[in-house]
Image (cartoon, rainbow, N blue to C red):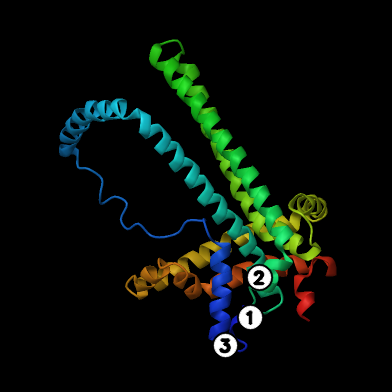
Amino acid sequence: MRTVLFSPFDIEKWITLGFCAWLSLLGQGGGFSGNPFGSFPQKNSQPQIRETIQSWVPKVENYVSTNVLWLVPLAAFLVVAAIAVWLVILWISSRGQFLFLDSIARNRSAVAAPWKEFAVQGDSLFLFRVVTVAVSVSLFLLTVGLGALVAYGYHEGTLPKVWTAAIAVVGVLLWLVLLFAAILGVIVLDDFIIPLMWLHRSGCVAAWKEFGTLLTVRTGAFFRYLLMIFLTSIGIGVAVLTLMVMTCCILGCVMMIPFVGTVVLLPVLVFRRALSLTFLAQFGPRYDVFATSR
């Protein structure tokens, strides 16, 4: 991180690297919503809120029934438009992953050249992410549907309370397992699969296969890496939170500004990106992304 950003310090390089990092993070959320408890309704206001909702329900139903001919096409158009925008953002983000990695591996600030050079890898990553998101959403809808069926069975009295509780416990445990698997999958994809794709100019599936081979040989090392990432993330979070408090939340306001916040946090982002690249380099020249800049 020090070599890339401070040896020497170049504001133009910072801006270019910040742009590449910003592209790679597109669609991954962010922002601060303030106190999440401040807008909760007070207990004595709940009857008024309930009465207001009950009075509006018939009005909404009447409006929808009388305007269904244009509301349904409008809703379908908005859904299709939202999906299209999400796909474009995901495609740009997939390309941006390789721009940011290339900038660190080769210690350069370039956009056009790596955008063209890693077009195939970026498109492969994009397709893989689309498929995984589609599968995740399908599983989510399936579990929600099953949960609704269980709740309906319990409400109608056709499902005993013991079975309902057992299914609920199993469902929660299954959700936790799926959540852990999703987090682990994102870490592996960002930290190892994308660098392997960059190194060998391979597709996403081929990189996963190679990672599986490497994992079987060095399982302990990867387990220790995950533990290190967990502890490092806590340290980074505490450091950023401390700086936000010391600056009276000015840093937090700056971090909310698109692109500007990425440039401000560039040392953290470069450090985090270089961490996995340095870890991979210990397994030999075949996994050393920094060999191209030596």
- To which quarter of the image does residue 34 belong? bottom left
Q: Amino acid at mark 3?
A: Phe
Q: Amino acid at mark 1?
A: Val
Whole-percent x, y for residue 180 in the image: 59, 45
Residue 181 visible in the picture:
no
The crowding category of the residue bearing disc 2, from other C-alpha atoms within 10 Å (few below 14, some 14 to 19, many at least 20), is: many
Q: Is residue 271 above or below residue 85?
A: below
- Element at label 2: helix
Badge 2 or badge 3: first in the primary sequence: 3
- To which quarter of the image does residue 136 belong? top right
Dot 2 and dot 3 residues touching (CB under 8 Å): no
**Identity of the residue furthest to the top in this view:** 158
Left or right of 209 on screen, residue 248: left
The crowding category of the residue bearing disc 1, from other C-alpha atoms within 10 Å (few below 14, some 14 to 19, many at least 20), is: many
Whole-percent x, y for residue 201 in the image: 79, 62
Q: Residue at x 36, y 69 (%)?
A: 253
The crowding category of the residue bearing disc 3, from other C-alpha atoms within 10 Å (few below 14, some 14 to 19, many at least 20), is: few
- Front residue of 122/223: it is 122
Badge 2 or badge 1: first in the primary sequence: 1
Which residue carries the number 2 mark?
274
Whole-percent x, y for residue 217 in the image: 83, 54
Dot 2 and dot 1 residues touching (CB under 8 Å): yes
- Element at label 3: loop
- To which quarter of the image does residue 53 belong? top left
State how far apart marks 2 and 3 are (Cα): 18 Å
- Front residue of 226/185: it is 185
State how far apart marks 2 and 1 are (Cα): 10 Å
Q: Nearer the viewer, mark 2 or mark 3?
A: 3
Which residue carries the number 1 mark?
4
Q: Amino acid at mark 2?
A: Ala
Which residue carries the number 3 mark?
9
| Quadrant where the N terminus is found in the figure | bottom right
